[in-house]
Amino acid sequence: MKEKRLLTPAVITASAVCGTSFLIYIFARMFPAFAEWWARYPSQILRGVLAAFTNVFPFSVGEMVLLLLIPAAVLYVLASNKYICDEDGKKYFRALRPLIIIILVLASVFFGVFGPCYFRNTLDENLGLQKEKVTAQELKYTAEQIVNEINSLSVKADSSGATVIPCGYNELVDDIKASFKDYCEKNEYISWFDSKPKLVSLSPVMTYTHISGVYSFFTGEANINFNYPDFVMPFTIAHEMSHQRGIAREDEANFLAFLVCINSENDYVRYSGLFNMLEYLLSALNKADKTLYKEFVQESVTQNIRSELTAYSKFFEKYSNSAASQVAGSINNSYLESQGQKAGSASYGLVVDLAVAYYKNK
């Protein structure tokens, strides 16, 4: 009769851990000071442990889990259906318990590790920046500074006009990690731990979702889509590494990626940070003042920048109107809104407010 019980010690323990994690998450939503402390210390340790464990594997554990999820679910349903027919019921409960424990563990990792990071102090507070609503003129000024910095760099392009990473992936990652480690040592709100970003094996398929990278909170991995044009990759690596180190909000992860990239000793990493920021600024300027945007593009955007943008547009043609991107975008938007990011998916572009504040301070 004992084997029929659903609430075994293992299930009770997992439920208690999940309940505690949920209370931590709720407390973080209510009190930013607590969320900041939790993100800096307990969460940082837990994220580091997860990353250290999965770093042993040369492939993305998160991707493998997701790929195995559907066949595992089908097998589980088939097996459970068979056990339901068992009048004694003990095999059914025995099969159900592991599933419940897995769900509780995954919920615990989110609520207790990454979830609270959405409600910590804002990045401008931690950096001492004065973030305000920006004007079109301020966007133009910031874009001009970015263009000037891009033009000072030496990067090579192929026949299509797209720039090319001048080194292998491992060397690129080492350069970004070195810059990130240096940044963490100079800023107390964020700490460093070593972990290599993983390339997603199904990157060409992933591109149809318009996702260039993703942080897998349940495995602690920064996952990178290698199918995007080269100039996107260094910035994406730094963005996902920012999530990995407790910067949850998308605009803030973008801005930290920018800061890490522009402080790299690698010209191409700096170029990636600057160019990706320029894209956000151009988009914001176009929305704020179309006339000023056209003037800026005509007067300040150089041929090499135009060539990169043109090559990117051509690359993205076959991915632009995919159904997968609409589904992924809708899910991501709802998720971000649920975590207090009222702008949803549009929050990525709010990085321009931080960029304007940064260049005002320079």
Image: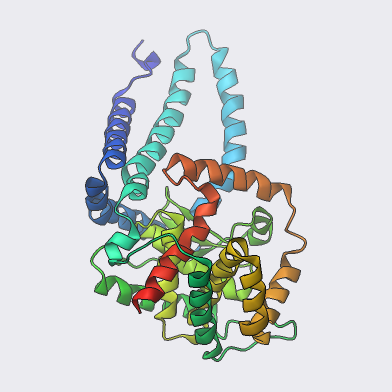
Q: Residue furthest top?
A: 87
The residue lying toward the viewer, choosing from 147 and 310, is 147
Which x, y percent locates residue 266? 46, 85
In the rendered image, the vertical position of residue 70 relative to residue 38, given as above or below: above
Q: Is residue 196 visible?
A: no
Q: Quadrant of residue 359?
A: bottom left
Q: Residue at x 46, y 63 (%)?
A: 134
Which x, y percent locates residue 24? 27, 38
Q: How many marks?
A: 0
Q: Residue at x 53, y 74 (%)?
A: 140
Q: Residue at x 26, y 38 (%)?
A: 27
Which image quarter holds the N terminus?
A: top left
Which x, y percent locates residue 43? 28, 51
Q: Is residue 41 visible?
A: yes
Q: Residue at x 51, y 80 (%)?
A: 146
Which image quarter holds the C terminus?
A: bottom left
The residue lying toward the viewer, choosing from 322 and 15, is 322
In the rendered image, the vertical position of residue 150 relative to residue 57, given as above or below: below
Q: How is the image coloured?
A: rainbow
Q: Quadrant of residue 90?
A: top left
Which x, y percent locates residue 311? 72, 75
